[in-house]
Image (spheres, helix red, strand yellow):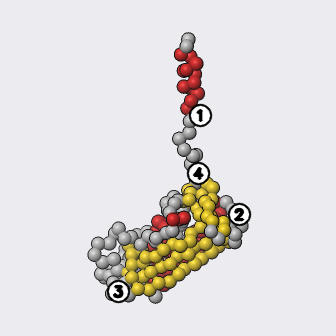
Amino acid sequence: MRLWPALLMLLALPGCISFGEDPPPFLLTLTPGQTVEPGTSRAGADGRSITIAEPQIPQKLSTNRLAVTTGETTVSYFPDAIWADTPNALFRDLVGEVVAARTGRIVLDPRQYSSSPGLIVNGQLREFGYDSRSRQVVIVYEAVIDDEVGGIRTRRFEASEPVAVEEAQYLAQALNSAANRVAAEVSDWVAG
């Protein structure tokens, strides 16, 4: 009889224990507005490929949470807005796909090339989030092109998009639209 209270407590215990937060209802991602058609085959001379590197990011973006600028020196994160990967990885994939679709050239991930990466696009993704003061999403990408003959070019790309409703899916849609605009501009710059 003395064991019954202890057994009842053990049975009730799983309802009281939580092993972390509940997962968000959905994950956010970026979708390229232009893609390479299925079945497309490409070949190119040595050095004619383009390698898109994952951009460096500041610490505030080194997470899969959606950054919100709340003041000149303050940042927070939007509740229940979780990226499927870090912003720089998602942005690199989107830019790579758009550049491949728009230029017709072979676009490589740095892990794919062996001896001839061709034109290398590096850079820093300085801003990638929501500015609650202006009610806009903001992307700032500082790109660097390093070609195989030692030439270097830089350019800053910026895009913003207003957000009418402060909800995760609308913020992601606005960031997706802004990211596609930046990717198209990067593509034109790389091809030029």
Residue wearing tag 4: 24
Crowd tier of the residue under label 1, counting other residues whose Cα lies within 10 Å: few below 14, some 14–19, many 20 or above: few
In space, the residues marked 3 and 1 are separated at their CA atoms by 62 Å
Question: Closer to the N terminus: mark 4 or mark 2?
Answer: 4
Q: Identify which amino acid the numbered label 1 is placed on.
A: Cys
Question: Closer to the N terminus: mark 1 or mark 4?
Answer: 1
Q: Are marks 3 and 1 in contact (CB under 8 Å)?
A: no
In front: label 1 or label 4: 1
Q: Identify which amino acid the numbered label 3 is placed on.
A: Gly
From this viewpoint, is residue 91 visible?
Answer: no
In space, the residues marked 4 and 3 are separated at their CA atoms by 46 Å
| 93 in relation to 7, above or below | below
Residue 43 located left or right of residue 14: left
The residue at the far front in this view is 73
Residue wearing tag 1: 16
* Nearer the observer, 100 or 52: 52
Q: Identify which amino acid the numbered label 2 is placed on.
A: Val
Residue 183 located left or right of residue 163: left
Image coordinates of residue 178 in percent, x first then y, are 59, 73
Image coordinates of residue 12 in percent, x first then y, are 58, 27
In front: label 2 or label 3: 3
Question: Closer to the N terminus: mark 3 or mark 1?
Answer: 1
Residue wearing tag 2: 165
Q: Quadrant of the N terminus?
A: top right
Residue 150 disc label: 3
The number of discs equals: 4
Question: Closer to the N terminus: mark 2 or mark 1?
Answer: 1
In space, the residues marked 2 and 3 are separated at their CA atoms by 47 Å
Mark 1 lies on a secondary structure that is loop
| 78 in relation to 2, above or below | below
